[in-house]
Image: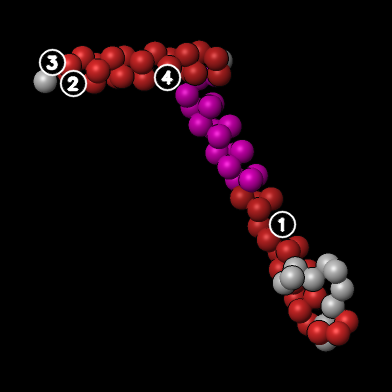
Amino acid sequence: MIRRGFWLAAGFGLGVAAASQVRRAAGTPPARLADRVRRDVAGAVTEGRREMQAREARLRRVLAAPHEQRGTDDPGQ
């Protein structure tokens, strides 16, 4: 039981130390860091939606063509 407690405390200490290092390396206060992360995630979601719409348009164009006219760009192959 003492062994488990030791490793639990060691893991917790390492986690706290790693979090402080990351916070120090970021060089920004947590509020600004949260704003930056929020902006990055929103940008990634917007870009993902744009790519998804482009992919769906390609699929519709290719799948709307008759089977004989589908080329090598057929995403279904």
**In terms of secondary structure, what is the magenta stretch mainly?**
helix
Question: Few, some or many C-alpha atoms within 10 Å of disc 3 (few <14, some 14-19, many ≥20)?
Answer: few
Classify mark 4: residues with Cα within 10 Å, few (<14), some (14-19) or many (20+). few
Quadrant for the C terminus in the image: bottom right
- Any magenta on residue 32? yes
Q: Which residues are magenta?
A: 28-44
- To which quarter of the image does residue 61 belong? bottom right
Q: Which mark is residue 4?
A: 2
Marks 1 and 4, how far apart at CA: 34 Å
Which comes before the other along the chain, label 2 or label 1? 2
Residue 75 at x, y = what percent?
A: 75, 68
Where is mark 4, residue-wise?
A: 19
Element on which disc 1 rests: helix
Q: CA distance from mark 1 to mark 3?
A: 53 Å
Instruction: Identify the residue under disc 3.
Output: 2
Name the residue located 69 percent from the left edge and 50 percent from the top edge. 47
